[in-house]
Amino acid sequence: MANKSVRMAELKKNFMKHHEEGKTIKEIAELYNVSKRHIYTSLQDIADENNVSRESLLTNVHKKHKPLQNTKSAGQINPAEMKENFDGIINNAKIIIKKIDSILQEEIK
């Protein structure tokens, strides 16, 4: 493994790429075989070199979400079929409401 100064030079050079990929400081430290503390002490230099704030380097960029392996695509949505299904649901709800109304009317009498 290269000495620490060479590794830190590479780390500083590639830090922003890793940060934008969503890697944490811990993950970056493991990539370059340096301590997290060593990275934290270098953050201001990295920030200055890249015209960003140190605080922005402390926040994690969210990684892109990967779909679950067992999920399947829903396929194309057919708007006409969807409307037909929705209309059926509304009609069923209206029937249920009418039945409830008639039951309530019976109880009032």
Image (cartoon, rainbow, N blue to C red):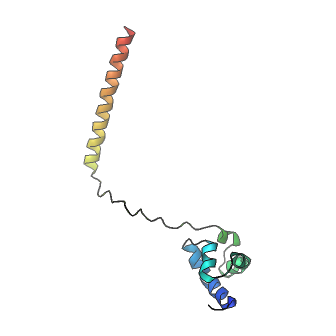
> Which residue is at 49% across, 67% downward?
64
Where residue 8 sits: x, y (%)?
67, 86
Q: Nearer the viewer, residue 83 or 39?
A: 39
Quarter of the image where one finds residue 98: top left
Looking at the rendered image, the quarter that the N terminus falls into is bottom right
Q: Outermost residue, top direction?
A: 109
Quarter of the image where one finds residue 70: bottom left
Q: Outermost residue, right direction?
A: 41
Quarter of the image where one finds residue 25: bottom right
Q: Nearer the viewer, residue 30 or 48?
A: 30
Where residue 108 sits: x, y (%)?
39, 10
> Which residue is at 39% across, 64% downward?
69
Q: Does residue 3 sit above or below 76 in this rendering? A: below
Q: Does residue 104 sit above or below 48 in this rendering? A: above
Q: Nearer the viewer, residue 44 or 66?
A: 66
Horizontal side of residue 45 vs 78, given as left or right? right
Where residue 27 sits: x, y (%)?
60, 74
Looking at the rendered image, the quarter that the C terminus falls into is top left
> Which residue is at 68% across, 75% downward?
36
Where residue 16 sits: x, y (%)?
60, 78
Horizontal side of residue 83 vs 55, given as left or right? left
> Which residue is at 29% across, 32% downward?
92
Q: How many marks?
A: 0
